[in-house]
Amino acid sequence: MKQAELEILASLVDNYRDVLHNFKASGKYKPLSLVALKSREVLVVWVAFCIIHSNVVRLHKSQMEGFGVPLDFNDLSHLVLSNPTEWEVVLQIAKYLGKYGVNKPIFSLKDEKSTFSM
């Protein structure tokens, strides 16, 4: 991905989250579960993370070698999703994140040591 495409992706995620926030603030979400809406938001953000991370690894393979990701795919088990396609996305995210693991996570707020050891 080129820088412009990454910026478009980030903008799409931001726009999605803004629309979702406004939708929830309007009170029109009542027939939908707030938990389900939040679960979809998490899914969108994690997909964007995987796309961006993949691009960073491709561009900076030697620098990223040996580093894990700051996201644990097991955390996705708490999502409330009703659509089989959404669960397929969860499986793809888990597959991608599983390749890198959580040891020595880079850009993690939980453990900054790895980031500063680059």
Image (cartoon, helix red, strand yellow):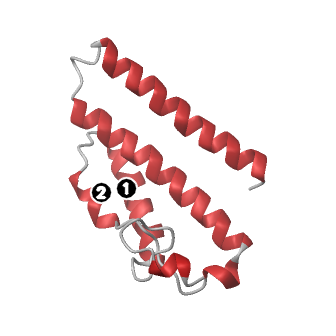
The image shows residue 58 at horizontal and vertical percentages of: 69, 71
| Badge 1 amino acid | Val
Callout 1 crowding tier (Cα within 10 Å): few <14, some 14–19, many ≥20: many
Q: Is 50 positioned to the left or the right of 33 in the image? A: right
Indicate whether 48 appears above or below 91: above
Q: Is 61 positioned to the left or the right of 29 in the image? A: right
**Quadrant occupied by the C terminus:** bottom right
The residue that appears at 31% across and 33% down in the rendered structure is 37
The image shows residue 57 at horizontal and vertical percentages of: 64, 72
Q: Quadrant of residue 101?
A: bottom left
Note whether residue 83 is visible.
Answer: no
**Quadrant occupied by the N terminus:** bottom right
| Badge 2 amino acid | Leu
Indicate whether 39 appears above or below 31: below
Task: Provide the secondary structure element on which disc 1 rests.
Answer: helix
Disc 1 and disc 2 in contact, CB within 8 angstroms: yes
The residue that appears at 46% across and 23% down in the rendered structure is 19
Residue 4 or residue 96, whichever sits in front: 4
Residue highlighted by disc 2:
76
Indicate whether 18 appears above or below 58: above
Residue 52 or residue 86, whichever sits in front: 52
The residue that appears at 31% across and 42% down in the rendered structure is 39
Q: Report the mark closest to the observer, 1 or 2.
A: 2
Task: Provide the secondary structure element on which disc 2 rests.
Answer: helix
Q: Earlier in the sequence, mark 1 or mark 2?
A: 2
Note whether residue 67 is visible.
Answer: yes
Q: CA distance from mark 1 to mark 2?
A: 7 Å
The residue that appears at 25% across and 48% down in the rendered structure is 79
Q: Quadrant of residue 85?
A: top left
